[in-house]
Amino acid sequence: QVQLVESGGALVQAGGSLRLSCTTARSIFSINAMGWYRRAPGKQRGFVASITPGGITNYAGSLKGRFTISRDNANNTVYLQMNSLKPEDTAVYYCNTNPTTIDWGQGTQVTVSS
């Protein structure tokens, strides 16, 4: 069973930054676009950003400019750099392929205090 392992979530003040990381099996990572998704309290999980194996990125419109997705193909890791964080960014953040093809991992909690 392929696993997704997210990390890097934390409690941070508004205006702060965090970098999330996600690793998975090379067999999955090397051939798939990878994405970040989030589920805010009381809301459905939604798309945040994605990146193809060649580095083409896509963002949810409201997040472009504050969030940056990147990937390290040598280490099967995808990152999400989050800057200028706002309380409304509070959510559990998940990674998966894009489109999603793997069972979801546990995610990593990001809490932004005002």
Image (tube, rainbow, N blue to C red):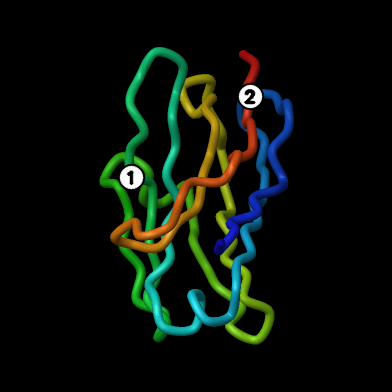
- Residue at the (73%, 26%) spot, across then down: 11
Q: Which mark is residue 29?
A: none
| Image-quadrant location for residue 101 | bottom left
Q: What's the residue type where badge 2 is placed?
A: Thr
Name the residue rendered at 56%, 62% in the picture.
1
Residue on which the image places disc 1? 47
Q: Quick check: 3 above or below 47?
A: below
Give, as a three-letter code, the residue at label 1: Phe
Q: Which residue is mark 2?
A: 111
Write down the quadrant of residue 4 in the picture: bottom right
Q: Circle 2 — which element?
A: strand
- How far across and down, in percent of the image, does residue 57 sit? 35, 68
**Location of residue 19 in the rendering, given as x and y in whole percent from the top left corner:** 66, 51
Q: Residues within 10 Å of mark 2 (few under 14, many from 20)?
A: many
Looking at the image, which residue is at 55% across and 63% down?
2
Near mark 1 (Cα within 10 A), the count class, few <14, some 14-19 or many ≥20, is: some
The image shows residue 54 at horizontal and vertical percentages of 40, 86
The picture places residue 16, in percent across and down from the top left corner, at: 67, 35
The residue sitting at 62% across, 23% down in the picture is 112
Mark 1 → mark 2, Cα distance in angstroms: 18 Å
Q: Are marks 1 and 2 in contact (CB under 8 Å)?
A: no
Residue mark closest to the camera, 1 vs 2: 1
Q: Earlier in the sequence, mark 1 or mark 2?
A: 1
